[in-house]
Image: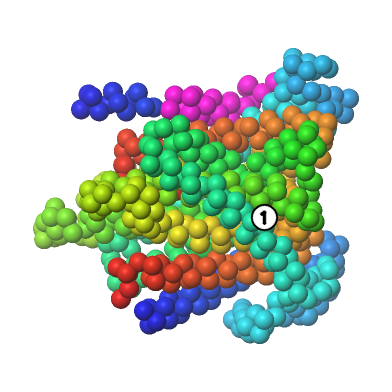
Amino acid sequence: MTAHWARVIRHAPLAALLIIAAMILMAAGADLLAPHSPIAVRMELALRPPWFMAGGQHAYPLGTDALGRDVLSRLMYGGRASLLVALISISVSTVVGTGFGLVAGYAGGWVDTVIMRAVDVVLTLPVILLALIFVVIAGPSLWVVTAILTLVLWSRFARLVRGEALAWKHREFVQYARGAGSTPLRIMCVHVLPNLLNSVVVLATLQVGFAIVVEASLSFLGAGAPPPSPTWGGMIAAGRTYMETAWWLVLFPGTAIVLTVLSFNLFGDWLRDVLDPTIQQL
Amino acid sequence: MVRQAGARLIEAVITLWLMTIVIFCLVRVTGSPADVILPDTATNDQREQATKLLGLDRPLVVQYALYLSTLVRGDFGRSYTLNVDIGPLLLNHFWNTFRLATASMLIGGVLAIPLAILAAKRRGSAWDRLASLVALGGMSMPSFITGILAILVFGVWLRWLPIYGAGGWKHFILPAITLGWFNSAGILRLLRSGMLDVLSSEYVKTARAKGLSERVVLWKHGLRNAALPTLTFLGFSYGLLLAGAVTTEVVFAWPGLGWLAAEAVTRRDFPIVQAVTLLTSAMIIALNLMVDVLYAVLDPRIRG
């Protein structure tokens, strides 16, 4: 036991955990930590380079954008948007997907067929294009992004939980509980669900990176929060025009996305090795 | 076998039909197409007129039936802003998307398949570490960021390659490598773990014990058995490339389907976005179907 835990801790992705902690801290504390307003326009400060370059100032350590806004402050608020979208969409789809998966796996029959058919349809949806339809009709907002992500993500949880529920439902203790007269709801919640929680937690962690990538892609395409709200994807889209002269406008938000996604993927991989090495997932 | 394929075909058609319902409902639930076409200054009379003209005052079921019947006849409707039929437009842009997707599949495969085999054969070696690095990068870097970084380095700083548009073969290099890298991540992970499983199996030990050469063991006994899950992934990701390369096409201004849809969004031309979504869903479903059938051909255990 102790040897196992020693091995687990030795293999913990320390850098990834630090980056995740830093990102969460900056996103949550942006109001206190950000040195400047993320949206106040000051044209006289436009396109200042980062502090280590000629013309850069320590007051604007990562430079300013074409409207003179501080890049570091915008990165902090943009991180808040990305993490919030990921948190809300994954929380909702974990609950919804686990519920549908449990019912499908435990009930079987036509209920199972209907739910699994819906899962199949959702899994073939082209996420980005579907979000674009939404955006044309309803206008761009982070709520559209969150809704689309939830619509797509619940199916992954449903499929995983259904498979596991099928495996657990024939175990002896579940059969005993049924023989003793437990209701199906009670059996699912008390006897089956607790055995699945590890897998669900691992899957949820592994989806954070996906959620952030989709949010960033949609914000990049102009389907996320409308300007002037800062998002990482939106910052890259706006900075693209100035790439020849102001590389920091695309490189810093790009690095923020890659570091965050990479860290959550490494953290998820580690969590899987610790909690549930059997989950197969790309 | 033929019956199985037939059953899968029927399932695929049902999935596609459900997809039309999902898209139709999403569009109608989130707002009225009349509001999308008209400017904000339109009067109520004009709104009513447009609603009548587009048939939006009829019951939803009737509207859906009309929508489906035009679709079945291969009519994708007309673009609001370009004033052309959408069908031919889709065909033109599909050709560009198809060329790019195929090129990036080839690059991803050429890069990933030998590397995955090498990584599995020499587990823990430098090759293995390189493979997991490439896979981790491909998984964690959204392709639009890879694309922009590639443009920054090779287009803006080094000025080696053209950075946007479709023209000669040079235009393929950056977008195809960008998408190919993304693609290789999945191949690397799946094929490596598949090969590891197979190489430690009893029949590979038997084959080695029989004194077969390492090449025969690796390629004939190893790869053929490890390749099946990778094949599913390849079909799936080819579908995604045909559908989901929206951001990469936008980054490189590559005039494919995704670029067409993203451009249409800026003009709020929703019939185009709707048509592209439906077409790409159909392609994903068709590819999944083909992979299923191919799977049954290659793996005797699945044949009923």
Between residues B232 and A137, which one lies in front from this camera angle? B232
Q: Examine the rendered structure and indicate whether residue A159 appears above or below residue B162.
A: below
Amino acid type assigned to the residue bearing label 1 in the image: Val
Report the magenta stretch's main SS.
helix
The mark total stands at: 1
> At which x and y percent is residue A86?
53, 43
Q: Quadrant of the N terminus of chain B?
A: bottom left
Subunit under mark 1: B
Q: Is residue B4 above or below residue A42?
A: below
The span picked out in magenta is A13-35
Q: Position of residue A103 (x, y in %)?
A: 32, 61
Tell me where residue A276 sits by quadrant.
Answer: top left
Q: Is residue A277 left or right of residue A174?
A: right
Please identify the quadrant where the C terminus of chain B is shown. bottom left
In this rendered view, identify the residue nearer to me: A245 or A201.
A245
Foreground of the two, B126 or B253: B126
State the residue in front, B27 or B174.
B174
Q: Secondary structure at mark 1?
A: helix
Task: Please check the rendered image and state whether residue A254 is part of the magenta-colored stretch, yes or no.
Answer: no
Percent position of residue B30, x then y = 64, 63
Image quadrant of residue A6?
Answer: top left
Image location (x, y in percent) of residue B6: 43, 81
Circle 1 residues within 10 Å: few <14, some 14–19, many ≥20: many
Instruction: Left or right? Give the position of A275 relative to B155.
Output: left
In the image, residue B19 sits, relative to residue B191, either above or below, namely below
Q: Which residue is drawn at the image coordinates 69% and 37% (left, top)? A: B149
Query: Who's the residue at 44% across and 55% down the image?
Result: B230
Q: Which residue is mark 1?
A: B246
